Amino acid sequence: MAEKMVVLAVLMMLAMVAATSFPTAVDAEELDGKQQQTTSIDQIRNKAKACCNNCICTKSIPPQCQCTDRKKNCYRGCKRCRCTKSSPPKCRCVDIRNFFYPKCRTSSPLPPPPPSSSRCSPKCKVCMCTKSLPPKCSCKDAPPPPPPSSCSPDCKMCICAESFPPICSCKDAPPPPTPSSCSPDCKMCICTLSFPPICSCNDEPTPPLPPPPPSSCSRHCKMCRCTKSLPPQCSCMDTPTVPPPPSGCKPECQQCSCSESYPPICSCKDD
């Protein structure tokens, strides 16, 4: 019995040694996954270059530096590469070195896109917008005409700048605005349908007023009578010095013609 127990113990020891020396199917699968992961990390390392834009170092001598950049892959000499499971992965090398990493070369930035607006300025008269969301609008107004290099022939005060070509502007006083209504004394006012309307008075011309009475008498007047108004109205009260018309003809007249008035007024009809 003792010999059998010794044999059983030896067999059990041999079975345990064999189990630890040969991997099972599950262990083989795990080893294959680890080898594949190691191979993919090695490929990532081989594609990158040793450079860093954000390198953190201590003030010790020698310095202890670590790169904090997150890239698609680690550089070739990285020993501890940590990558996320995103696609594409974001990797970071957590090695601590005693030197500064060189800066990575960055490609020239793309030019900014042309400015776009969802609406035009308030001064724009013709605004064209796309149907996109948000819309892109642009002003299509005609460009303003260039400033004149000389004034019009009717300008009286023309001021020009010393530039080349000169920029001139007329400084004449603006003309008075066209009347939009007639005066209160107008009886027949005709206006156009424009805005603002242009009106004109079509009343008939009134006859001129008679001259006012004289404010003094002539110097030949001997008896001048004036009122107390301001200005005074005066009239000459002298008796007329013109002799009355003759009541008969001369004796030498042969054909005398007289009127029927009293006194009669006669005139000679001789040839």
Image (cartoon, grey):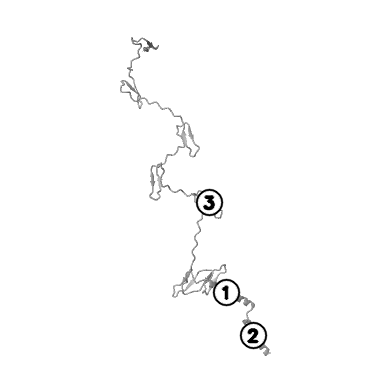
Provide the secondary structure element on which disc 2 rests: helix
Figure quadrant of residue 268: top left
Q: Amino acid at mark 2?
A: Leu
Q: Which residue is under mark 2?
A: 14
Which of marks 1 and 3 precedes in the sequence? 1
Indicate which disc residue 39 carries: 1
Between residue 38 and residue 57, name the one nearer to us.
Answer: 38
Q: Position of residue 234 (x, y in %)?
A: 34, 23
The location of residue 180, given as percent across then percent down, is 46, 37
Quadrant position of residue 5: bottom right
Residue in view at x 59 percent, y 75 percent: 35
* SS label for mark 3: strand
Tell whether 2 sits left or right of 248. Answer: right
Quarter occupied by the N terminus: bottom right
Q: Secondary structure at mark 1?
A: helix
Which is more foreground, mark 2 or mark 1? 1
Q: Is label 3 in contact with label 1 (beta carbons under 8 Å)?
A: no
- Mark 2 and mark 1 residues within 8 Å of each other at the beta carbon: no
Q: Earlier in the sequence, mark 2 or mark 1?
A: 2
Q: Label 1 sits on what residue type?
A: Thr
Amino acid type of the residue that numbered disc 3 sits on in the rendered structure? Met
Point out the tag, 3 or 2, that comes first from the N-terminus: 2
Q: Quadrant of the C terminus?
A: top left
Residue 236 versus residue 45 in the image, above or below: above
